[in-house]
Image (cartoon, grey):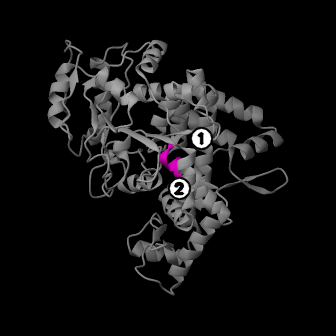
């Protein structure tokens, strides 16, 4: 599908959104060149404006625009921009797709292939797979793994090697007839039979699907003739290679444009950065609307890609830039001190978000990570990147969501998450055991005449102050422990 964007199209969208794009941004909206957008460049606004223009011109009922992001946060931001427009709303339904790279791989490749092989899909989640799988292991197998300093089955995943899927068995370098080896295989088979899979495994399963049915690539290319990828700097090498397999070769007509900023790339200790974006020559948006000229003059000297950061915002009278000196005894106080600094230095009417950013999210005994500063932070291979590790943390998130249906669902999500991690079942009125899910929780509450009590509990959690004493009483009264 060939959709051209004219100067008039951009003029119209400027008027519609009450914005003004300079020449550099206009060129990016009209082209499909890969872009490096500096912090505060209005990258999401550019992407949303381009999508709105395309939506107005889109006529096909069977082809769609594919918008891929690295995180759910970026996905949500793009969707919120499109929801404000009637034309943008068209892109939120089939045949279009807006979601994370993981969601795309799951929906269009891995899940269809697994179902064609007779598997059901219950949950795709590393934490749940690890907890559930470990609980299934025999005591002897656990002892064997622990003697080898292995306390998780995180690595018990399939990898596509030389045309077939091969299962990695933690603690073993080669096939074995030992009881522990066989137990690990049996546990993996049980997890798969119940529909539990690891995140990265879905890429490997997709590779096998493509290997046996290469036409699936042509089908996806036909479905999505226009593709945008946001936060491209954070894609890992295997994701970059996978996306290139699907959308980039000399024989296709897919138009793909990637947005990001290599200067803001974040990687874990074992992650390889992508090769085709972070190390490429990119179209640059160099002027920021977020920080002032004083910050720009400092930051440009630290640019990975030597981007010439500029800003038209003058240098106001403000607090000096602050550097905290931290040692082992003060590390856990960093966030509190940062919050105190913000309360003093940031104007009370400031609408910009305040963020803390760290390079490594996964826990490590041998090096500093975000967890060294904030104990409850958890980073999995999930696209969400952060998971609450205690039920009360879901409550705190819900309390920030204006006490609406989103808050109610957040609390349910917390109950479901920890229920699945704990491998619990819901005992229904007839004595049968059901998997924990939103539908089953609501069914149980209705049949047990507990729906009103549960809703009163949620209201109490949302409106009353929560102390250690009241939290314990609430849990014991409503049997949520």
- The span shown in magenta is 100-105
Q: Which mark is residue 63?
A: 1
> Which residue occupies the foreground of this view, 397 or 140?
397
Q: Residue furthest right?
A: 430
In the image: residue 44, left or right of residue 94: left
User: Which residue has dot 2 on it?
Assistant: 217
Q: Secondary structure at mark 1?
A: loop
Earlier sequence position, callout 1 versus callout 2: 1
The reply to whether residue 357 is in sight is yes
Separation of residues labelled 1 and 2 (CA atoms): 14 Å
The image position of residue 291, as x and y in percent, is: 26, 22
The image position of residue 138, as x and y in percent, is: 56, 75
Q: Residue at x 33, y 45 (%)?
A: 370
Magenta-highlighted stretch: main secondary structure? helix
> Which residue occupies the foreground of this view, 437 or 260?
260
Density class for disc 1 (Cα within 10 Å; few <14, some 14-19, many ≥20) is some
């Amino acid at each position: 599908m060939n959709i051209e964007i004219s100067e008039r199209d951009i003029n119209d969208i400027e008027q519609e959104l009450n914005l003004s794009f300079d020449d550099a941004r206009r060129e990016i909206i009209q082209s499909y060149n890969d872009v490096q957008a500096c912090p505060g460049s209005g990258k999401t606004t550019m992407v949303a404006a381009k999508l709105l223009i395309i939506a107005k011109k889109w006529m096909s009922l069977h082809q769609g625009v594919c918008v891929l992001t690295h995180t759910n946060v970026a996905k949500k931001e793009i969707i919120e921009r499109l929801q404000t427009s009637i034309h943008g709303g068209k892109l939120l339904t089939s045949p279009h797709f807006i979601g994370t790279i993981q969601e795309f791989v799951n929906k269009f490749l891995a899940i269809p292939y697994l179902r064609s092989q007779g598997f059901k899909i219950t949950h795709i989640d590393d934490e749940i797979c690890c907890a559930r799988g470990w609980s299934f292991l025999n005591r002897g197998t656990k002892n064997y793994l622990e003697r080898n300093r292995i306390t998780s089955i995180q690595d018990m995943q399939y990898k596509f090697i030389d045309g077939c899927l091969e299962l990695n068995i933690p603690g073993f370098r080669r096939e074995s007839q030992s009881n522990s080896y066989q137990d690990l295989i049996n546990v993996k088979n049980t997890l798969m039979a119940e529909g539990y899979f690891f995140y990265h495994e879905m890429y490997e399963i997709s590779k096998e699907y493509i290997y046996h049915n290469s036409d699936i690539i042509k089908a996806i290319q036909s479905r999505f003739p226009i593709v945008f990828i946001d936060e491209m700097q954070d894609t890992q090498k295997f994701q970059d290679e996978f996306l290139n397999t699907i959308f980039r070769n000399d024989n296709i007509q897919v138009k793909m444009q990637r947005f990001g900023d290599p200067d803001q790339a974040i990687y874990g200790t074992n992650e390889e950065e992508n090769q085709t974006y972070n190390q490429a020559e990119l179209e640059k948006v160099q002027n920021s609307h977020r920080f002032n000229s004083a910050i720009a003059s400092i930051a440009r000297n630290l640019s990975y890609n030597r981007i010439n950061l500029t800003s038209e915002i003058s240098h106001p009278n403000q607090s000096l830039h602050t550097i905290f000196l931290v040692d082992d005894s003060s590390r856990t106080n960093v966030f509190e001190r940062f919050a105190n600094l913000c309360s003093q230095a940031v104007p009370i009417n400031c609408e910009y978000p305040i963020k803390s950013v760290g390079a490594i999210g996964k826990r490590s005994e041998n090096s500093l990570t975000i967890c060294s500063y904030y104990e409850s932070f958890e980073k999995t291979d999930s696209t969400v990147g952060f998971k609450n590790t205690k039920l009360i943390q879901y409550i705190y998130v819900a309390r920030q969501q204006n006490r609406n249906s989103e808050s109610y669902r957040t609390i349910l999500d917390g109950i479901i998450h920890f229920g699945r991690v704990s491998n619990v079942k819901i005992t229904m009125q007839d004595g049968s055991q059901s998997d924990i899910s939103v539908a089953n929780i609501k069914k149980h509450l209705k049949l047990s005449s507990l729906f009103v009590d549960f809703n009163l509990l949620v209201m109490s959690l949302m409106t009353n102050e929560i102390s250690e004493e009241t939290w314990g009483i609430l849990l014991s009264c409503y049997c949520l422990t």
